[in-house]
Amino acid sequence: MTEPNPDREIVAVCAKAIYEEFLRYNSAFSRTTNRARRRFEQRDWQGHQKDIAERVDLYEKSVQRLVVSLRKVLDDRVNDHALWPEIRWFFGERLAKVPDAGFVKTYFNSTTRRIFGTVGIDPEVEFVAPPFEDELELIQSLNLQRYPYWASVDEVFTQVLSDFAFKVSYADVEHDIDFIAREVEQFIRINLDGLQELIRFEFINSVFYQSARAYLVGRIVLNNNISPIVIALKNTDKGICVDAVLQYEDEVSIVFSYTRSYYFADPNSVVAAVHFLHTILPRKPIDELYTVLGRLRQGKTERYRIFNHHLLNTDDQFVHADGDKGLVMIVFTLPSYDLVFKIIRDKFGYPKTIKRQDVLDKYRLVSKHDRAGRLIDTQEFRKLEFPLDRFAPALLDELFSEATETVTVEGEKLIINHVYIERRVRPLNLYLREAHREAAKRAILDYGQTIHDLANTDIFPGDLLLKNFGVTRHERVVFYDYDEVALVTECNFREIPQPRDDDDTMRSESWYHVNPLDIFPEEFIKFLAMDAELRELFMQVHGELLTARFWREMKEKHLQGEISLVIPYYRPSVPDKQYHST
């Protein structure tokens, strides 16, 4: 007879408490997510922006609340490392083969990491995520709307728009159906095997909301091929209408970019939805797909797991990332993997006057803001460990001399107590030296459009040096240096006062008073470290960015509650200049 386990009751109580707190968190997440439909129907874009910030905070607040509760339940046994493996086993047994159980296990891990201050991974008290292949059997649980092709694309999309109807009616549904059908038929004839090979269309049975757009996300199934299809909807004064039909992988990839705000969607299985998306976007990392759906902690878990697997199967060393040395961050990368790691320096170089807490606050601001396709999503990690011998000597020297508050060594491991991880892009200043002339011109125009787009979403980048911007694989310019980011509405945009006399012009310092948030756009010309031709092109198209008037007008729009939309796709009817905002 098995001896009774004296801890079984407390194990069950703790496991149940963790599970129930997760359900409360997940319910709150779903409530916030489901508000997106009403926001879209009512064109409440300001409310949507508030929901973005609110949803980001839900997870951390929930874990903090749970840890306080467990400390009360367990008292002096809360750090009993012999007890927690039992809780882990008991908890895991009850989640076997449950769809999306990985989310619940990640939540369990967050709890134990907070309690124990875990460095690296502790498999005794954490769940190690299953390999990608082990989750494939759960994909079939995803609710899809399937539309067989019976020789009429019009009939298919008549049913699609009927199934995905809103309280607001379509402005001209017949026009929309005709538009979709023409776009789809043309794409299939040109890029796929022709309509004779078309089998059906499949759409996730959940609308995806982001900013002021709603998306129907699906795939085209042919005899020997599948292809993405995303239908973008907008809500106008006259009603809802189809704004674009996206079918090329690259344009769909940009809509699901790591530089955009997280989607508000509620598929019945997020794991299955992620794998569905991966079938139409095979080059998009799984971790980014979790993140773009708003499951930030699961995205972090997947990113670390996938990267750790890569690290174990390679032998190259971490080195300084390409680009100019930063005054605030030490930035390094593993050449064989598409990520960069950013560690805050102990002290910041001149002329930086900000503090460490200021940097943390700026990164939090970006995480809760509409990134407009121009700010890279950055994930914050704590207490990571890496093999010491995988770091190049020059990088180690800098870490040990300038990041002593953040890095330590334990045996053969380098412990990083705090780091930001983000996708690697090519610094714009380096890109301009390497690119052919036409590509360089496009990049400079997009650099200006990046600043426009950020201004439209109430973001002033602060430091406009080209080295703080990067170019993605889609040749889009993005901003990634957040230590001086500010809201446009917080800044005071001024013209440079006229000098009183010749003595003023000779002074090494300003002859006029400057407050901390005073900005002088006329000085932006100093940041345009480019050749004469590129500078002339920039000034011709984006010269207004160098005027205080432009920024004051933008500030006033935001103060009046006006929302300027940055659309993440190209529409042929849109003038060329606006194309760069996509």
Image (tube, rainbow, N blue to C red):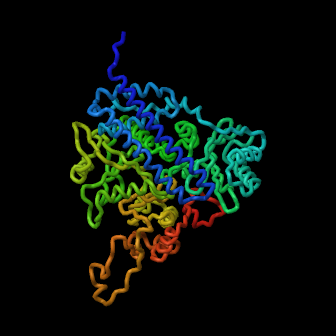
Of 442 and 5, nearer the camera is: 5
Of 573 and 318, nearer the camera is: 573
Q: Quadrant of the N terminus?
A: top left
Specify the farthest residue to the bottom: 501
Query: Residue 322: image x %, image y %?
Result: 36, 54
Of 159 and 438, nearer the camera is: 159
> Above or below — where is 171 with respect to 218?
below
Specify the farthest residue to the top: 1
Of 447 and 224, nearer the camera is: 447
Whether residue 437 appears in this view of the structure is: no
* Image mark count: 0
> Above or below — where is 400 with respect to 271?
below
Residue drawn at x 22%, y 39% is 410
Query: Residue 196: image x %, image y %?
Result: 75, 40
Left-right relation of 341 to 98: left
Left-right relation of 318 to 196: left
Residue drawn at x 65%, y 50% is 231
Left-right relation of 216 to 397: right
Query: Residue 365: image x %, image y %?
Result: 41, 57
Residue drawn at x 50%, y 34% is 100
Q: Quadrant of the C terminus?
A: bottom right
Whether residue 237 appears in this view of the structure is: yes
Query: Residue 317: image x %, image y %?
Result: 32, 43
Answer with the quarter of the image where residue 386 lies.
top left
